[in-house]
Image (cartoon, rainbow, N blue to C red):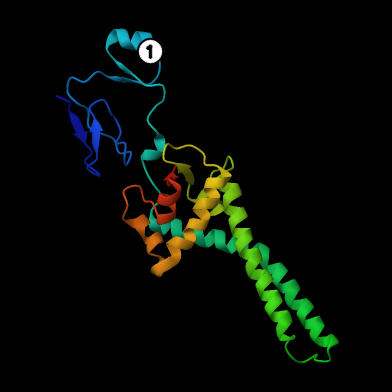
Amino acid sequence: MSVNLFCTQCGASNSVEARFCNRCGAALPPVPGAPPLVTSGLSPAVAASTGAIYSVAAAPSFAAQYGGFWIRLVALIIDAIIVRIVVAPVGLLLAGLGWLGGMNHGFPHRLPPPALLIVGGSVTVLLTIVGQWLYEAFLLSSSYQATPGKMIFGMKVTDLEGNRISFARASGRHFGKYLSAMFLCVGFILAGFTARKQALHDILAATVVGRF
């Protein structure tokens, strides 16, 4: 008869040989009489001869702690400020060009023509959207695995096994934030209630935000 272990954190069923929960990553209590788990120092052949269970990799360190809702919110605000600092000069330049255009039309003391305001505002918004995407996707898929806002608090974005994510997955995670923002930001609030502190965009991209 097979024996299963049930995680005390999320209730998931795990095999008796498991040392960490396959759903939330929490440590499982040792089973009396179970052979020890060997992660280094012994070859598979030696481990088999001694009755130990051989594992080629240690348990993922990211399972210990995840970035919670509030600390991630502060990191998000910091990153938003950084992107806007970069985009702001472009918006000011467009506003200046609009003002000069108004002067050329004989309106030195009035607002620029509406068309210039619309074009300038649209370009600024577009640059902000593209800038946020590239800023986040490049940094999360880089060796840093984090944006400056997350680096300040020692956080990294990884896949569920603790590996670095690709540019494509980082992009999908970024645009998934638009879904998280819908319906009063309920998708973001999920990070305060899920076992691995995952927001909706984390769940969709199969990522976690770990603290190291």
Q: Is residue 198 above or below residue 2?
A: below
The residue at 26%/25% (across/down) is 17
Image coordinates of residue 126 in percent, x first then y, are 64, 66
Within 10 Å of disc 1 (Cα), the crowding (few <14, some 14-19, many 20+) is some
Q: In this view, does 103 lie above or below 5?
A: below
Image coordinates of residue 179 in percent, x first then y, are 45, 61
Image coordinates of residue 103 in percent, x first then y, are 83, 87
In the image, farthest residue toward the front: 1
Give, as a three-letter code, the residue at label 1. Answer: Pro
Locate the N terminus and report the quarter of the image it occupies.
top left
**Element at badge 1?**
helix
Locate the C terminus and report the quarter of the image it occupies.
top left
- Residue toward you, 145 or 129: 129
In the image, farthest residue toward the left: 1
Question: Horizontal placement of 149 versus 131: left or right?
Answer: left
Question: What is the count of numbered marks?
Answer: 1
Q: Name the residue under label 1.
A: 44
The residue at 70%/76% (across/down) is 119
The quarter of the displayed image where residue 44 is located: top left
Question: Horizontal placement of 172 versus 45: left or right?
Answer: right
The residue at 29%/29% (across/down) is 19
